[in-house]
Image (cartoon, rainbow, N blue to C red):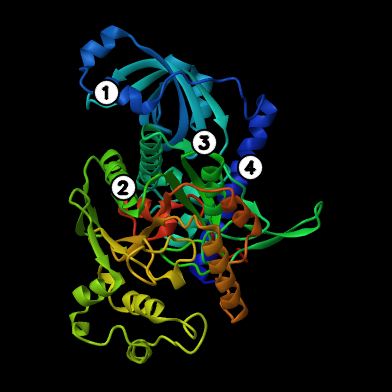
């Protein structure tokens, strides 16, 4: 600990001790932390309603309000005092004097601290400078803040502290609050869009006896009563498709999923997806629908389908591009045009140049399609700024997708990329139980060969398919990444209220 840090800590500890003394005095004077005040008004609504009302007109209306919030600024000026109070909707000023609240209450206010939660009853007026204010007739301390807020000019300077103490970040950073308000707006828009299009929202288990629905490493746990190993879900896919078998033809779930993998600016071990399935549709229909969802969410959340992300425009209003894996390689890495991109030796040599080890799982036994995909990820994926569907993935990396009727070794699958990142994954669903069983067996062989992310054999899911699933397409959209886009946030932690961090020392 540096001397400067030690001084700050000492100062903070001194302030906390002083505030605890004030709390002790409050306890002796009456009921601390009362719960009998109900605010009837919100700062933001009052500011909007009376923004254009002039001072004389407002005085004439004599509008009485009751309001509560956190004191963010305080000015005690002898006979008159002012406080800026913040609630969930915005800020408003309190005007306090002896005539309004009484000498005793006014004197007590002078000893309250920034961060305290206070409440007032009074009449609205505007100051000579035109600031909407409450002339307090009653003033109460509702909740004591024992810890001082960060300096108003510097806020929470340390990014990790912003994530770890999100409650403080929300208090002092309007931009953070705005981000999560916009996230909520976007999620509501997404849910409304699904409901409008006859999708039924469902809930499926988070604890799975077999991890499935994606290629990922799961979190393991143990159920004591059943004495069995269980897994936090990596995806809801197989349960949602069981519902399609059961006769619900359009279903969706906004779900939390968990993958025991790395943490980065675009990865969190716990994340939100929306998965949705529609019977009697194929992947072409699903691409169009996915495009419509994303465009709608952007429009509702931001007011436009043309966004700016990290200083660069991204246009969601135009038709999204569609490219094959090899087509994307040749477009964004034209040095590969006319080369042997269908040759195993060539692809492995190129990947080696990029630092990719193809002698280890999962690429050790990979076919041409998987090697092409690996090369795409190295040379093209990060360049896909505008919305682009990469289509027609190889069977070996798409164990749940329906095979193409016209192209051997290819599935009817797409992934959506924007700003150089994957946002969605969808396909025509494999509904042939015998083909699916064979695919699962191939995944088990991959797992035995060292691929930790390969799928397990799910016998119950095969049994469900044996009852018959109609032709179906499905898609999963990464909600957190989409929220990064609509809120112009560079890091996934910026759009998670409580991102995962290392445990504090």
Residue 291 badge: none
Foreground mark, 3 or 4, reads 3
**Is 6 located above or below residue 485 in the figure?**
below
Nearest to viewer (mark 2 / mark 1): 2
Tell me the CA gap for discs 1 and 3.
24 Å
C-alpha gap between disc 2 and disc 1: 45 Å
Q: Earlier in the sequence, mark 4 or mark 1?
A: 4
Position in image of residue 292 (x %, y %): 28, 45
Q: Residue drawn 56% across and 71% down?
A: 443
The answer to which of marks 1 and 3 sits earlier in the sequence is 3
Q: Is residue 297 shown to the viewer in this render?
A: yes
How packed mark 4 is, by other alpha carbons closer than 10 Å (few <14, some 14-19, many 20 or more), is some
Q: Which mark is residue 127?
A: 1
Q: CA distance from mark 3 to mark 2?
A: 41 Å
Q: Is residue 25 above or below residue 467?
A: above
Q: Find residue 208 and report its horizontal and vertical position in percent.
A: 65, 55
CB contact under 8 Å: marks 4 and 2: no
Q: Position of residue 170 (x, y in %)?
A: 44, 45
> What residue is disc 3 on?
116
Residue 98 visible? The answer is no
Secondary structure beneath label 4: helix
Q: Secondary structure at mark 3?
A: loop
Label disc, if present, on residue 20 of the rendered structure: 4
Residue for badge 2:
294
Marks 4/2: CA distance? 50 Å
Q: Residue at x 51, y 60 (%)?
A: 8
Q: Quadrant of residue 259?
A: bottom right
Q: Earlier in the sequence, mark 4 or mark 2?
A: 4
Q: How many residues crowd around disc 3 within 10 Å: few (fewer than 14), some, or many (20 or more)? A: many
Which numbered disc flags the more N-terminal residue, 3 or 4?
A: 4
């Amino acid at each position: 600990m540096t001397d400067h840090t030690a001084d700050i800590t000492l100062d903070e500890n001194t302030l906390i001790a002083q505030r605890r003394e004030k709390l002790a005095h409050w306890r002796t004077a009456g009921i601390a932390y009362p719960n009998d005040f109900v605010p009837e008004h919100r700062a933001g609504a009052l500011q909007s309603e009376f923004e254009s009302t002039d001072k004389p007109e407002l005085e004439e209306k004599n509008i009485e309000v009751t309001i509560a919030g956190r004191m963010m600024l305080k000015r005690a000026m002898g006979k008159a005092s002012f406080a800026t109070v913040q609630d969930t909707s915005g800020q408003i000023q309190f005007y306090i004097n002896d005539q309004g609240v009484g000498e005793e209450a006014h004197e007590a206010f002078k000893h309250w601290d920034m961060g305290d939660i206070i409440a007032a009853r009074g009449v609205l007026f505007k100051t000579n400078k035109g600031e909407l204010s409450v002339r307090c007739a009653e003033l109460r301390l509702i909740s004591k803040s024992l810890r001082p807020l960060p300096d108003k000019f510097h806020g929470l300077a340390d990014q990790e502290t912003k994530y770890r103490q999100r409650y403080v970040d929300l208090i002092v950073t309007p931009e953070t609050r705005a981000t999560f308000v916009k996230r909520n707006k976007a999620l509501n828009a997404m849910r409304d869009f699904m409901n409008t299009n006859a999708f039924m929202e469902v809930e499926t288990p988070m604890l799975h006896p077999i991890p499935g629905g994606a290629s990922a490493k799961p979190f393991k746990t143990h159920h004591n009563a059943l004495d069995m190993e269980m897994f936090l879900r990596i995806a809801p896919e197989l349960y949602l498709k069981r519902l399609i078998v059961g006769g619900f033809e359009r279903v969706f779930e906004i779900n939390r999923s968990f993958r025991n993998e790395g943490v980065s600016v675009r990865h969190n071990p716990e994340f939100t997806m929306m998965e949705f399935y529609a019977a009697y549709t194929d992947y072409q229909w699903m691409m169009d629908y996915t495009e419509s969802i994303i465009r709608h969410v952007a429009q509702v959340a931001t007011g436009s389908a043309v966004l700016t992300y990290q200083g660069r425009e991204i246009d969601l209003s135009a038709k999204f591009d569609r490219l094959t894996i090899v087509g994307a390689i040749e477009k964004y890495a034209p040095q590969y045009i006319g080369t042997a991109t269908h040759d195993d030796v060539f692809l492995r040599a190129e990947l080696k140049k990029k630092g990719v080890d193809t002698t280890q799982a999962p690429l050790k036994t990979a076919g041409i399609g998987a090697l092409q995909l690996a090369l795409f990820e190295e040379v093209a994926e990060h360049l896909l700024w505008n919305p682009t569907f990469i289509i027609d993935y190889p069977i070996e990396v798409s164990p749940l997708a329906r095979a193409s009727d016209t192209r051997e070794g290819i599935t009817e699958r797409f992934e959506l990329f924007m700003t150089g990142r994957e946002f969605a994954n969808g396909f025509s669903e494999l509904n042939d139980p015998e083909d699916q069983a064979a695919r699962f067996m191939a995944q088990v062989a991959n797992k035995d060969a060292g691929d930790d992310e390969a799928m397990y054999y799910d016998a119950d899911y095969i049994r469900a398919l044996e009852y018959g699933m109609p032709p179906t397409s499905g898609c999963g959209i990464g909600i957190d990444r989409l929220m990064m886009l609509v809120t112009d946030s560079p890091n996934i932690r910026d759009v998670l209220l409580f991102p995962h961090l290392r445990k504090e020392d």
